[in-house]
Amino acid sequence: MARRTIVTGSASGIGRATADLLRARGEQVIGVDLRDAEVRADLGTPAGRRDAVESLAAALPDGVDSVVACAGIAAQEPATVAVNYFGTTALLAGLRPLLARGTDPRAALVASITATSALDEATVAACLDGDEERAVACAAEAAPYEIYPSSKAALARWVRRTCLAPGWADAGIPLNAVGPGVVRTPMTDGLFSDPARKAAMDEAVPMPLNGYAGPETVAAALAWLTSPENTHVTGQLLFVDGGAEVALRGEGLR
């Protein structure tokens, strides 16, 4: 039987590339997005997340084999925290019972190389405390350029915190994240069209190996992390960044 996979953010960017790749491999993909998806939902709101989980549970009563959470935004505004962190973690937590009924269940999400950048620790802490109201309020007080990295750093930490929690590793469910560098998607079009912003981006995220990535490159990493072949990788942030993380942080592992 074909693997049953849920992909959030399936209408564009990395989510669309992932959904296309998995469908080409014969998987049954159920997309979740604001539009142009099998399940339409606003993951930036608690009600939207509940509706998405309920719709997916009704559509997949026998369980799901993998979940790939790609939905996210890069705006320098507090709503980014609601979508990126709470929209992702609430959905994965809500779908864990479906994964537990699946075959070779796997889960992965999209973090970012920016998780290594300047952060607002108050926003990160509020996210990890599960306090969405406080997290959004902290983000409103943070420097705008810190909001997106903070949401992604919180996700990476959530993966490490959650991967060994009851119902994940002990149920045979690996949970991982990818950390893309600069990816050519509609979300980054504005960076490439503005020479000054592009120069700043090149300095902030140097990618010596093959330069900017296409979304298909990140999709391939997500596909492996959520495949039956991944039996022992969990709790990891896999940088798909052309060497940016090494260029920025050097050879040290600590």
Image: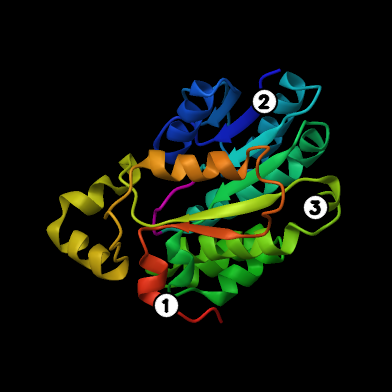
Callout 2: helix, strand or loop? strand
Residue 189 coordinates in the image, percent (x, y)? 25, 45
Residue 4, disc: 2
Q: Is residue 161 visible?
A: yes
Quick one: quadrant of the C terminus?
bottom right
Count every numbered label the image shows and give the total.
Answer: 3
Q: Nearer the viewer, residue 190 or 106?
A: 106
Residue 53, image quadrant: top right
Distance in Å between CA atoms under marks 3 and 1: 30 Å
Residue 249, disc: 1
Residue that appears at 41% across and 71% down: 246
Callout 1: helix, strand or loop? helix
Distance in Å between CA atoms under marks 1 and 2: 38 Å
Residue 115 coordinates in the image, percent (x, y)? 49, 66
Q: Sequence order check: which comes first, mark 1 or mark 2? A: 2
Residue 45, image quadrant: top right
Q: Amino acid at mark 3?
A: Ala
Crowd band around label 1 with a 10 angstrom C-alpha radius: few (<14), some (14–19), many (20+): few
Q: Residue furthest left?
A: 195
User: Is residue 90 rendered to the left or right of residue 168?
Assistant: left
Q: Which residues are magenta?
A: 72-76
Residue 63 coordinates in the image, percent (x, y)? 78, 27
The residue carrying mark 3 is 169
Tell me: residue 118, above or below residue 75.
below
Residue that appears at 85% across and 51% down: 170
